[in-house]
Image (spheres, rainbow, N blue to C red):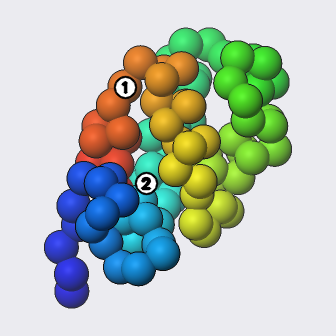
């Protein structure tokens, strides 16, 4: 089984897929996103109003329904929540 790396350097990885898309268990990342949102007392709509992301997509991320999450959307959420992408992906 390949090891996971939290580096998101686009010069590494496998072809056109970012390393963020290589994580096997997005439900863990989604769980962490939900905890971050809930710890701030924010609804899905609150997040959507503060970040350029629809509340439906945030919900998909949190439930693991987004099988290949957008790196730019993950970065926007990390900025909003005040965490690094490394911290977020280390939950996976």
Residue at x-position 48% and y-position 61%: 26
Question: Is residue 1 visible to the viewer in this orientation of the structure?
Answer: yes
Q: Residue furthest front?
A: 11
7 to 58, vertically: above or below:
below
Please tell me the numbered disc located at residue 28: 2
Helix, strand or loop for disc 1: loop
- Distance, label 2 to label 1, CA atoms, is 16 Å
Q: Identify the residue under disc 1.
A: 83
Q: Which residue lies furthest to the bottom in this view?
A: 1
Give x and y (percent) for residue 89. Answer: 34, 49
Give x and y (percent) for residue 85. Answer: 36, 39
Horizontal side of residue 66 vs 39, given as left or right: right
Q: Which one is in front, 62 or 6?
A: 6
* Quarter holding residue 41: top right
Residue at x-position 56% and y-position 31%: 76
Q: Which of marks 2 and 1 is in front?
A: 1
Q: Which one is in front, 34 or 8?
A: 8
Q: In which quadrant is the N terminus drawn? A: bottom left
Q: Earlier in the sequence, mark 2 or mark 1?
A: 2
Question: Is residue 23 visible to the viewer in this orientation of the structure?
Answer: no
Give x and y (percent) for residue 5. Answer: 21, 61
């Amino acid at each position: 089984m390949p090891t996971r790396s939290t580096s998101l350097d686009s010069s590494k990885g496998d072809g056109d897929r970012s390393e963020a898309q290589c994580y096997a268990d997005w439900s863990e990342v989604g769980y962490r996103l939900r905890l971050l949102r809930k710890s701030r007392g924010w609804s899905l709509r609150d997040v959507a109003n503060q970040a350029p992301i629809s509340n439906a997509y945030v919900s998909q991320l949190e439930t693991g329904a987004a099988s290949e999450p957008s790196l730019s959307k993950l970065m926007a959420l990390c900025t909003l929540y005040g965490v690094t992408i490394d911290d977020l992906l280390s939950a996976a």
